[in-house]
Amino acid sequence: MDIHQEVQEYYGKELKESDDLKTNACCTLEPPPNFIKEAMSLVHDEVHRKYYGCGLAIPSELAGLKVLDLGSGSGRDAYITSKLVGESGEVVGLDMTDEQLLVANKYVDYHTEKFSYQKPNISFIKGNIDEMEETPLKNDYFDLIISNCVINLCKNKEKVLRDCFNKLKSGGEFYFSDVYASRRISAELQADPVLYGECLSGALYWNDFLKIAKAVGFRDARCVSKKPITIENDSIKEKLEGTEFYSLTYRLFKVDGLEDDCEDYGQSVAYKGTISEQPTSFDLDGHHNFEKAKLEKVCGNTFLMLKNTRFEKHFDFYGTFDDHYGIFPGCGSSSPFEGVSGKNSTEGSCC
């Protein structure tokens, strides 16, 4: 049995609901903001019970977007997103596990009525994330791709990230939560079906992830939030001794002109306060909080992430790329594991 079959068995047969997990790696470890809570309250209970995410994989400002949910499972995040994009938006969920797809498809009509839509704006298709070329998903089509604790379960993570880059429109975003390791995991541990199914032994070493992201075109990965993962199961803990695991949420933009480093061009931006979910301030990532009407100096990459994406209309922009002043100070460490007890390490419980 290959790893894909083992994952299907684990999530389709062995796990019946989130309480069956042996660690909190596949559990959301931070409380959601109110706009997600409100949409979440409308999602059917059975969909909730079979949710195995590890973070908050849904950003703000989604109205009218075309969204792909990779490894959509029972459909919890997809249905939340379906509410947030509105009836004019579109959500496609991709998953390879029949049992999970059965639950997701079971409640399409339920949520269409619950959201007061005239027709569904959501669909679920069966497919392997490692083989997206065999699905009907189009290139240069989606405004946003989300994924919650799934990339670690893929065999060829570089191919998956490259496929995501190709599926996005220019200016699009891959916003996802996953599990990362403080060191590379041995082949022996990766072959353990329980460790793999618990989203641990398939986790990328964080620095390998950053290198892969750059290689496929996502040149400046931004860490949005981070939380250490605790392992209470003694046998699993013993096998993984010496390796630390973290749930990290990243946003990767498909934007031309991004550089490997944060460079200073003397640019500034001011947030208008017009994103409905964040009227007083906007968090781009763990290092960039923009208060309404406050002029903020930014690096060239941050300037482009705001100007050449769906966020453009919510900011005023000052400056060009005509003059260069060296490295921009203060854009944050390249290691997401530093400062895990800080602002973006909010305590929370598995939901």
Image (cartoon, helix red, strand yellow):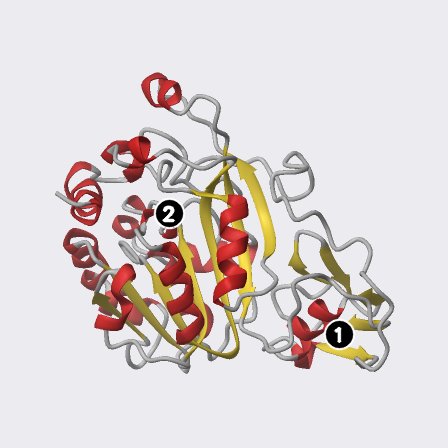
Q: Nearer the viewer, mark 2 or mark 1?
A: 2
- Residue 142 badge: none
Quarter of the image where one finds residue 301: bottom right
Give the camera-side residue of 266 and 146: 266
- Residue 272 badge: 1
Identify the image quadrant of the N terminus: top left
- Residue 152 badge: 2
Residue 223 in percent (x, y) is at 60, 52
Question: Type of residue at label 1?
Answer: Lys
User: Would residue 273 be seen by someone viewing this image from the given angle?
Assistant: yes
Disc 1 element: loop
**Mark 2–mark 1 CB contact (< 8 Å):** no
Quarter of the image where one finds residue 288: bottom right
Decide: is 240 above or below 70: above
Identify the image quadrant of the C terminus: top left
User: Would residue 59 be seen by someone viewing this image from the given angle?
Assistant: no
Circle 1 packing at 10 Å, graded few (<14), some (14-19), many (20+), is some
Give the camera-side residue of 340 and 157: 157
